[in-house]
Image: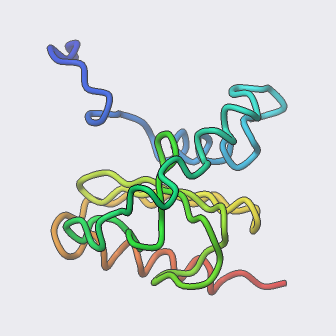
Amino acid sequence: MMSSPRNDSGGAGGLSTGRDYLRFAQMLANGGVLDGQRVLSRTTVRLMTSDHLGSRILPAPTPGGAIIGAASYTFGLGFAVRPSDGLAPVPGSAGDFYWGGYAGTFFWVDPKEQLAAVFMVQSAGALRLYHRNLYRQLVYQAIVD
């Protein structure tokens, strides 16, 4: 039986399929366009994926181990954002951005590599970070030019 939630939550309870989640990530990778239709303006995507913390507010080094490379990422409007190449515990490019769910789901977009990746898993606790890191490593290792 389906029923409406009694308490709306902007940060939890999202429901989707892996395919739709990947389409969402691909739309972001395309700068707001999906299947030739503009969903978000390019300026909105740029604003969402830009550094809004700068050097004034430093992220915690490892907030519960839940966030990949927390100290080498900053935050935009809705996503963790990698501000530069270089020092980071995971592969990626300046400008890549990601978000993950509490129980292990995870996605990221790397515009420089024209990459959108989605990881649908239920893996709480210490295994959550392990599986996210492993998935990201495997995806970047699979890139051949």
In the figure, is residue 131 to the left or right of 123? right
Label total for image: 0
Q: Quadrant of the N terminus?
A: top left
46 sits to left or right of 104: right
Q: Which residue is drawn at the image coordinates 50% and 75% (left, top)? A: 136
- Residue 91 x, y percent position in the rendering: 57, 81
Along the horizontal axis of the image, is 84 left or right of 143? left
Q: Nearer the viewer, residue 128 or 75?
A: 75
| Residue occupying the point 52% across, 47% down | 52
The residue at the far front in this view is 56
Q: Is residue 102 above or below residue 143?
A: above
Q: Position of residue 83 (x, y in %)?
A: 60, 65
Q: Is residue 136 above or below residue 46?
A: below
Residue 102 visible within the image: yes
Would residue 137 appear left or right of 93 to someone viewing this image? left
Q: Foreground: 141 or 90? A: 90
Q: Please tell me which residue is depicted at 26% across the width and 36% down the height of the picture.
A: 12
Looking at the image, is 98 positioned above or below residue 72?
Answer: above
Quarter of the figure with the C terminus: bottom right
Q: Where is residue 53 shown, x and y percent of the image?
A: 47, 51
Residue at the spot 54% in from the left edge and 85% down from the top edge: 87
Of residues 49 and 30, the one drawn nearer to the viewer in this rendering = 49
